[in-house]
Image (tube, rainbow, N blue to C red):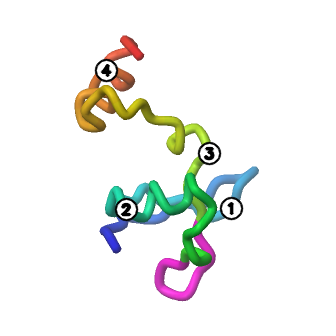
Amino acid sequence: MGRTGAPVHDADYGPVVLALVKRAVVEAAAAGTAPPLQADGVDAAIDPDDLQFRRSEKPGRLAVDRLRGKG
């Protein structure tokens, strides 16, 4: 479904990892039709803030703009 980076342990949230997932998985999660996500047998979740995307904008452009503080 995608790729994950190196996990780190956060004092408040526990294990945290950055992952790249297929857009279809994100859209299914937004629609509530995605099965439970797991990475190497560990439960995973998509940050709800990342489920808000505008169909009129290209997702890559929106992500770049957010990183640059424009979104």
* Residue 35 shown in magenta: no
Residue tagged 4: 65
Res 20 visible = no
Disc number lying in front (2 or 3): 2
Residue 63: x and y in percent read: 33, 32
The disc, 1 or 2, on the residue closer to the chain's N-terminal end is: 1
Q: What's drawn in magenta, residue-wise?
A: 38-44
Which quarter of the rendering shows the C terminus? top left
Left or right: 65 as drawn, with respect to 44? left
Residue tagged 1: 14
Looking at the picture, tell me which residue is in the foreground, 30 or 66.
30
Q: Residues within 10 Å of mark 2 (few under 14, many from 20)?
A: few
**Structural distance between the alpha carbons of marks 1 and 3:** 18 Å
**Structural distance between the alpha carbons of marks 1 and 4:** 29 Å
Residue 4: x and y in percent read: 36, 66
Residue tagged 2: 24
The disc, 4 or 2, on the residue closer to the chain's N-terminal end is: 2
Tell me the amino acid under the disc marked 1.
Gly
The disc, 2 or 3, on the residue closer to the chain's N-terminal end is: 2
**Structural distance between the alpha carbons of marks 4 and 3:** 18 Å
**Structural distance between the alpha carbons of marks 4 and 2:** 21 Å
